[in-house]
Image: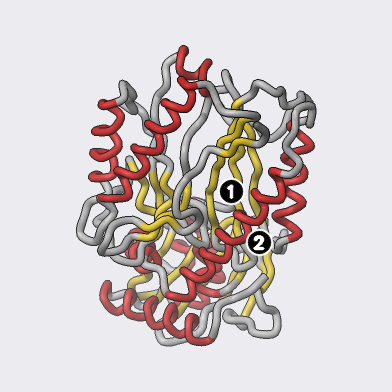
Amino acid sequence: MRGSSDAERTRRRDGLQALADAHGFDGLVVCGRGDEFVRGRIQYAADVYQWAGWGYLAVPAKDEGVFLADPLAGFTHVEPERPWATDVVVTQEPGRELASVLGTSGTVGVVGLDDLAAPAHIAQFRAAAPGLELVDATDAFDDLRAVKSSEELANLEETSHILRTVFTALEAELRPGTLVRDVLAEAHRLCRQQGCVDGIAMFSRPPMTAFTHGIDEPIERDDVFVIDLEWGGPSGYWLELRRCYSFGDPPAAVRRLWEARLETFDACLTVMRPGASTEEILVARDRVHAKHGLTAEGSVLYSAHGIGVDSLEPPWVPGKHRELREGMVLSLHPDARLDEEQRALAGLVSVGDNVLVTTEGGRRLTYEQEDWVVLER
């Protein structure tokens, strides 16, 4: 796995220090856990990849960080010869260790205080340092890492290149009679072979209302189906990408629904400019939905969300809205609540890709345009 460059480390370290100074923090704690949704917080701040268990990065003012690790030891330095957090403490009492690193008075910003840190660990921390004020710093941290550097964008584009390659290779294996489980197993093999560090491969066909991780049933000649790949590349930067398939041209009604979904995606791209609210993505989505008799009313599923070294980062759309800034990257997959007839016809036929916010609107990072893939004519 490839870590960040010296210049990128300096940029992030300076950003964290500026965050602490702006909020009056005497130190920072970054909470982590070994899953794809929050492990990236510590990886971003220290190039530590956590694949299991909990972890805490303690960053005293003007000093290097100390990484406190679960005795499970489910972590690794991304580049062992260049550790960012040079002091690692494996402990069963992280609260007490945090107090020993950060002192017992002052103000500490805690990234993940309200959404991730174990209550028992925080209680132990408070008991060991009663003079410390703990303040949630999650939003400030997320805002810092929301705008991607040129190095981060290169990492995201590398993952895009890999998944384009994987889909091309995988399509050579798609034929009637092939077991779905074998298709997804091959997708995993190809992604791992290309250096991806973690991810999932999923499949759906009508009338499925959800993706499956694999079933022992063959692909049929008259199927329309969707393959979804969500992977972190060699740098740990993620892409959620899906493609739609058929043997021969899809039925006209399926094609019309897919084209409506594509029109929705493109409409969302046009509003993804600096200064716009992420709520405008939903307005654009709903405007095109209404034109085609679709709706997402009442749905809390994300139509877009931030993405980077975690597969899910703020903003969450709907949910945790933000003003868009140039250089932000969102995973865009506009949701629609299909009725029973539509699901029976097209299942989860949809569009998804990473999108960079630019002054000209959203720019796709993987495919310049979306094509329905016809495997055989």
- Which residue shows up at 46% across the image and 62% down it? 127
Residue at mark 2: 70
What element does badge 1 sit on?
A: strand
Q: Amino acid at mark 1?
A: Glu
Q: Is residue 27 above or below residue 188?
A: below
Q: Position of residue 22 (x, y in %)?
A: 26, 76
The answer, for residue 134, to whether it is visible in the render is: no
What element does badge 2 sit on?
A: loop
Q: Is residue 65 above or below residue 349?
A: below
Circle number at residue 213: none
Q: Quadrant of residue 359 in the image?
A: bottom left
Q: Is residue 323 above or below residue 86?
A: above
Sequence-first disc among 2 and 1: 2
Q: Position of residue 168 (x, y in %)?
A: 66, 50
Q: Are marks 2 and 1 in contact (CB under 8 Å)?
A: no
Q: In what quadrant of the picture does the C terminus appear?
A: top right
Which is nearer the eye, 306 or 357?
Answer: 357
- Which residue shows up at 78% across the image and 30% down it? 179
Q: Amino acid at mark 2?
A: Asp
How many numbered marks appear?
2
Q: Position of residue 205 (x, y in %)?
A: 60, 25
Residue positioned most to the front: 377
Q: Quadrant of residue 162 in the image?
A: bottom right
Crowd rating for badge 2 (residues with CA inside 10 Å; few <14, some 14–19, many 20+): many
- Which residue shows up at 42% across the image and 74% down it? 149
Q: In what quadrant of the picture does the N terminus appear?
A: bottom right
Q: Quadrant of residue 273 in the image?
A: bottom left
Q: Is residue 144 above or below residue 182?
A: below
- Which residue shows up at 28% across the image and 44% down it? 281
Residue at mark 1: 230
The nearer-to-camera label among 2 and 1 is 1
